[in-house]
Amino acid sequence: MHQKQNPAGFYTKGEEIFNAVSHGAGSVLAIGGTGALVALAAALANWRTVLICLVYGLSLVVLYTMSTLYHAFPFEGVKRLFRVFDHSSIYLLIAGSYTPFTLILLDGTWKGPVICGVVWAAALLGVTLNAVSVERFEKFSMLLYIAMGWAVVFAVGDVVRALPSAGFWLLLLGGVSYTGGIVFYTWHKKGRVHYMHGVWHLFVLLGSVLHYLCILLYVLPRAYA
């Protein structure tokens, strides 16, 4: 008997448990990491830096929470709604991650605010399109995610000069992890290889950890150096 495809792409129960638990762990880490980052900024920097760190941290919390809820809810109607939230939160995470790099690391350059503004505008466009239809704009969204994620190439020289080599490698490998995980996402979509969506979740987690460490260790200190 043919199994009807649901909004999750007919994940098995085991897959959905793995998907929810993996990003549930990410949500817990994001909440704790945001608290630590904001507290450090409040103690050592100014209100502007605190706000920037809060925007970044909340983008992490929103992404991992929406993803967890999307995969945890068994009811199709609720799942469809949270699929919109889940896909939209990817845009927010990309823009949120750019915020400390462009407004702290590249502070004093014209490229920082411009790239930040363009990426946030693209994020708002993506969220709007997802609100209209996730399915209709799915391929466009994937291309927009990638384009936004690598918009940093337009300021790569400034970034290289501003970051020590260890910080640059954390930034680069985080981007590679986010992008490389798309391979497993597409394997799930096209070939229905079980647990590939969950593997993609792990790549997203790794990318988040690497970028968080880069911001904590190398970007934030520039605000109070």
Image (cartoon, rainbow, N blue to C red):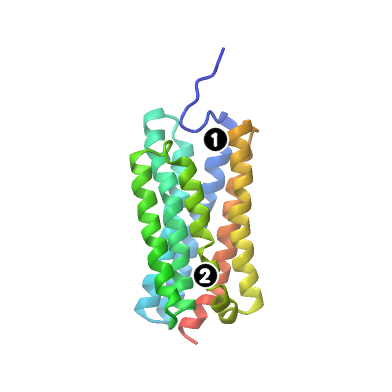
- What residue did someone put label 2 on? 154
Q: Which mark is residue 16?
A: 1
Which quadrant would residue 115 be assigned to in this image?
A: bottom left
Amino acid type, residue under disc 2 in the picture: Phe
Q: Which residue lies furthest to the top in this view?
A: 1
Query: Crowding at label 2, few (<14), some or many (≥20) Cα neighbours within 10 Å?
Result: few
Pick whichever, 130 or 210, lies toward us: 130
Camera-nearest residue between 14 and 189: 189
**Residue 179 image position (x, y, % from top left):** 59, 53
How far is disc 2 from disc 1 in space, using C-alphas? 38 Å
- Image side of residue 175 versus residue 103, left or right: right
What amino acid does circle 1 point to?
Answer: Glu
- Label count reads 2
- Residue 5's place in the image compared with 166, above or below, is above
**Element type at marker 2?**
helix
Question: In the rendering, at what x and y percent does residue 213 appear?
Answer: 57, 68
